[in-house]
Amino acid sequence: MANAVQAHESVAQADAHAPHAHIDHDTNTGISNTKLGMWLFLASECLLFGGLITTYLLYKHPLEGPTPKEIFDIPFTSTSSFVLLMSSLTMVLAVSAIERGDHQRLRIWLGATALLGATFISGQIYEFTVFVREGLGFTTSRFSSAFYTLTGFHGVHVTVGIIMLMSLVLLSLRGKLPEHRSETVEIIGLYWHFVDVVWIFIFAVVYLIP
Amino acid sequence: MAITSHDPIPTSQLDGAVKDYSRDKVYVLTALFLGVLTVVEVLTYAFPDFPAWSGNLVIAVLMILMAIKFFTVVYIFMHLRFDKPILSWIFWAGLGLAAGVYFVVMCTFRIFWPGSHG
Amino acid sequence: MAIIEAPAPDQLALPSGEVDTEFKPAGVFTRPKSGSTGWKSWLTTVDHKKIGIMYGATALVFLLIGGFEAILIRVQLWSPRGTLLSANTYNQVFTMHGTTMVFLVVMPIGAAFANYLMPLQIGARDVAYPRINGYSYWMYLFGGIFLNTSWLLGGGADGGWFNYAPNNGILYSPSHGIDFWNMGLLITGIASLAGAVNLIVTVLNMRAPGMSLMRMPIFTWMTLVTQFLLLFAIPVLTVAQVLLMMDRTFGANFFNVAKGANPLLWEHLFWIFGHPEVYLMILPAFGLVSDMLPVFARKPIFGYPFIVFSGVAIGFMGWGVWAHHMFVSGIGPISVTAFSLTTMFIAVPTGVKILNWTATMWGGKLRFTAPMLFSIGLVTMFTIGGLSGVTHSVAPADTQQTDTYYIVAHFHYVLFGGAFFGFIGGFYFYWPKVFGYMLNEKLGKANFWLMLLGFNLTFAPMHILGLQGMSRRIYTYDAGYGFDLWNKVATIGAFILASSVFLFIFNIFYSRSKAKSLPPVGADPWDARTIEWMIPSPTPEYNFDPIPTITRVDDFWYRKYGETTDGKLVRIAETDDVVQKRSDGKHIHLPSPSYWPIVSAFGMPIIGYGLIFNLWLCLIGGIIVVGGLYGWALEPADDPDAAHDDHDPADHGSDDGSAAAAITEGADAGDVATEKEPETVG
């Protein structure tokens, strides 16, 4: 690959500049500290979302106010779930773009991921406003509190992810994301996929299971 | 530019680099697969009386579909499959622990028993 | 500053034709210089040793606060119908006592030892993410201060350290105390979680050549287990606290019984966190004792793999016993039986440890120094606490013991008699390594006996009081129940205990003033076994130079001693010949200090106050946090212009990739395979 030869030169140069730690991992596990740290964090997040989902399952039958069955708009949520799912694809494509040294595509795919994420969030905000209009306020019932807290927590995670993706795009535009730092993209990708995976769970357990 | 004292450093040794980029194709196919599963999930809602998922069977069907989607993303998109096993161990530790303790909590609340709500 | 004036390195061409521009520090936040001294260097430090010392010092201050609260409790209970505290104040005092001791004293002392010692024990330069390490400390400090400011802003939390629902609701606790408790612990929780990720990565990734997992000192092992427990336990507490915050601040219904909520949810979530929590408080002390006993018995630890795996087993099984705190809550006979059984089983790995410590001492040449006395104190006192703990696993008995002073006696025996004795022993043991002078041995022994006496006088009578039926968390009692005598004994004991803590603090200052007239302690004052004793005391900033290659457990010991064929110990090298000499460390690249950890941590308590008093404050706090994190993310982890001699700025711009070679030149080729640079990404 012609591309690769070129990449070698600049990578060597990059390492001469911001050295040694990036040449090889120099760690006992062979995994970089950042990646190991991110996986540990994600493992810990399993217990966070697990607790919120448990709370929801415990409280999903309200004593008063609208029930899940009455209020959920499955076709709408299915669409936004699909959007979030596809953002995972654009995310992995962004990672492979930077590993190839293709900065243009990196930015396109990162931007697409952020856009899909933003679409999902807009959908969620719309969904919340509709629910509130239909009489499901945050304090209405045990179901409403649990539902808004769980999905809201997930929404905050997505938002944080979008901010990180946009920051990556800006960094890349300013030339601060050379391919020897491709792991940064990969790790933010891990976070992004995890948020997606949590939604896969929520979509099935909260929305679809009657 | 001339590289004098050191051999070039192959990209494959750099953080996160993959050796062959044909994985893009894998990613697209995976996304298609996930899309199809999502369609099946939604179908259980659209056609609740279809015999494959009628009645309480739908819970099992949805949980299985969800699990397949979940681990497809984790193992392909988050490339646990291609990564060092210790990462899988760590993730499984968190996931398994969460599943275990929260399942027990739900059991003590008897939420899987019929008529326990209200 | 020189950092700005340094010549800009050549810009870097990327294949896409872009350039990698150099980071320009912004205005007041010019990057602090590495290796500087003075108070500023403490604010910006990323050095795991300084952070460890700060953790320890802060925890001792909180110990005095929590101890003062304990004394208030004991004075109130000195006689029937005590009048020192009102019922309301008493509730706040015991709640804050428990919260302070658990979250701001015992856990942080564990973190102090983990931060200071663990990188030394594995031969690392620093932790994996030095800046996150600083962030953890500041979050802990600010969270602790935030929690204690509740005293000035309407009173402390008053629901007990576990704040059961629905008592923690706005209806039963209308003051802001529980909000402070909730937010304060969320902040320290973030600190613990970040610390957990950090320390686990450090242990897994940054060990010296040859330091396989099964060659690590026990303390490092226990740190690993502890941090895994934190990693998984903290989010569960976070969930509970988020639900509580939603209830109290935004009117949600998680614990609102009127809307069908189940208050048991809080108990479950709290104890799923809370039981691993008690193990993660005790395991660091177990680790310290497992490293101290072999030194003073002059024998290797008995059954190294057993002691390691029993620690791991405690870590695992600690997740399966939480409901034994809830036997009287009506969780049903099946749950009670199951959790009774798991609770009985968890005594097994703990018993294995006790056996191993006893067997380590058996037949050894024991030296009864202060650290040794405290270690033996842990083994004995913890055994008493462990045995009373097993009685809780018998559900019918537990039903009688729940919420009585018997429980109070039990957990003080394991936490004070266990964890705290181990920590004080650890202080005596590691003081020369950290500060370069020994704590006075005579005072140390007096300290031990006084503490042992005071401790047992305080807490042993509580077993009797509890079985007589005296409830915990009740601000007074009537005469005629037979509680008078033992309460008086306990109060006297509490004062003796307090004086022993003051004796320890006095010893610090006394020994420091005497140290100048004594010869320097040298690297290895105790004739110790693990590699942290190989480096000069106090520890140089760069830790090891060169990083040693490890060949077995207790590597340092076997550099000094060998064994004859009939198993006799013989000295093979003088200590002075095997310890490292202090070098100028100029060729060693250390992580650079940074302002951003303290800045972004500072925003968190402001968000906390905002959630309690005025949501606009949250915005200000949020801007500080986010701004801090951006400054942090944009700042390179390593300051490329930080001074280290044979790595001069010209290297940075060179295109021949020689920087990596330059960094290893200073290393002693005989001892070290490859000089490891910490990968500093935090």
Image (cartoon, coloured by chain):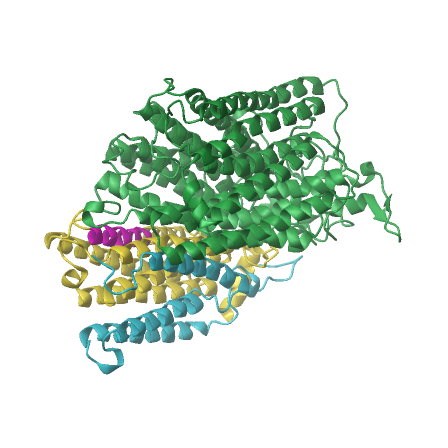
Q: Residue furthest left?
A: A134
Q: Is residue C446 visible?
A: yes
Q: Residue furthest bottom?
A: B51
Numbered label tally: 0
- The x and y percentages for residue C479 are 39, 22
Quadrant (top left, top right, bottom left, bottom right) of the C terminus of chain A? bottom left
Q: Colour of chain C?
A: green
Q: Which residue is more in the foreground, C313 or C216?
A: C313
- Picture quadrant where residue B43 is located: bottom left
Q: Is residue A23 above or below residue C590?
A: below
Q: Which residue is more in the foreground, C66 or C611?
A: C66
Q: Is residue C681 magenta?
A: no
Q: Is residue A193 left or right of residue C15?
A: left
- The x and y percentages for residue C46 are 54, 37
Q: Which residue is more in the foreground, C643 or B32?
A: B32
Span shown in magenta = A142-159
Q: Main secondary structure of the magenta part?
A: helix
Chain letter, colour cyan in render: B
Q: Residue at x 28, y 75 (%)?
A: B57
Q: Residue furthest front?
A: C480
Q: Colour of chain A?
A: yellow
- The x and y percentages for residue A192 are 37, 58
Q: Which residue is more in the foreground, C124 or A65?
A: A65
Q: Is residue C214 left or right of residue B96?
A: right
Q: Is residue C521 left or right of residue C409?
A: right
Q: Is residue C16 visible?
A: no
- Picture quadrant where residue A205 is located: bottom left
Q: Is residue C34 above or below residue B37?
A: above
Q: Residue furthest right?
A: C565
Q: Is residue A146 magenta?
A: yes
- The x and y percentages for residue C87 are 33, 25
